[in-house]
Amino acid sequence: MVYKADEQRYEKLPYRRVSDSGLILPAVSFGLWRNLGDQMPLENSKKVILKAFDSGVFSFDNASNYGPSNGTAEETFGQVYRSDLKPYRDELIITTKAGYHMWPGPLGEFSGKKTLTAALDLSLQRMGLDYVDIFYAHRWDPNTRLEETARALDLIVRQGKALYVGVSNYTSAQTAAIAEIFNELGTPFIGNQVSYNMLNRSAESEGLLDVLDKHHAGLVAYGPLAEGLLTDRYLDNIPEDYPIHRTNEFLFKNGKDTLLAKLNELNQIANERGQKLSQMALAWLLRDRRVASVVIGASKIEHLIDNLSFSEQMTFTETELAHIDDILNKQ
């Protein structure tokens, strides 16, 4: 059967302009980090990806090292793109990243010119694309001059292999430094993809949102549910071997009982709003116009639809926001 996208897809989810650029993203982007690589049957992955697009999600986020085996998430997306999504290329925002370990040897990671250009060429081959919409330097490179990284990304745009460039996991100071070089080069720098959620607000406290706004760029938030902590699955107990992402490890510093108490108080507010905790957590991130999109992953259609229902209630009263802040600021 030939796939035909839902004609009402753009009526189902809000979309947002990235600062004052010409780039528009859905409020939620679909991430293929570790959900749809070589762990999952292709047919399942196809159903979830196409359901996301039918639901108004037209931005798909990847990286050279996603899989779990390197490159397999891009290969999965590429198969679905070739078979079903290729007619919709002009509607899609497809992004990828390079910088974490991608292949053997010293050139298989970080952000030197050869590494970035080779990684993107491989990504394009795997996905069957002529270009990506955003190409990110996936992490800060302590060994390579920042100018080389910036010029490599600039070259990639001038070669027509990416429309925009960004960075990922850069601090506010690192972001400001590379943004200044991009400004001198005339490179279309669009933003920083970082870990940001209700429990991890470093993007606010360290001034990253302000830096991005100053440079006409936006923040794309990954890990919006803190690896599932901001759902109703762990309100009674957090397992001892909970697989927390390195960016959120600090959440356990005051003990899991303290965190559980916060989660239950937040869940109470969500219930009063007629939402699940996960839905409120997504809506809360998008309260700030500087957040261009929030990246979620899903391996099951029901989980995808459940999360996307956040759009039914996105507004907060000042009282609700103040109450949430009080909970989050507790030690």
Image (cartoon, grey):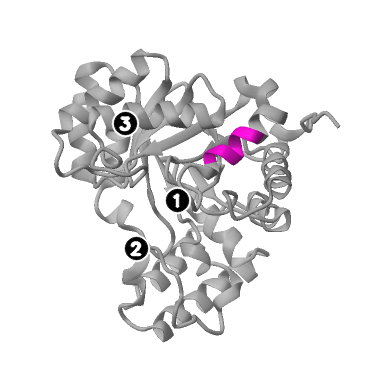
Q: Is residue 169 magenta?
A: no
Q: Which residue is mark 1?
A: 222
Q: Is residue 264 left or right of residue 155?
A: right
- Mark 2–mark 3 Cα distance, whole angstroms, equals 24 Å
Q: Is residue 76 magenta?
A: yes
Give the mark nearer the N terminus: 2 vs 1: 1
Q: Is residue 41 left or right of residue 175?
A: right
At mark 1, the secondary structure is strand
Magenta residues (range): 74-79
Tell me which residue sits at (31%, 70%) in the image: 250
Which mark's residue is nearer the viewer, 2 or 3? 3
Picture quadrant of residue 234: bottom right
Residue density around tag 3, few if under 14, some if 14–19, many if 20 or more, within 10 Å: many
Residue 319 is at least partly visible in this image:
no
Q: Residue 131: where, in percent of width, then height?
A: 48, 21
Q: Is residue 303 left or right of residue 134?
A: right
Q: Which residue is mark 2?
A: 246
At mark 3, the secondary structure is helix
Q: Residue 76: where, in percent of width, then height?
A: 60, 41
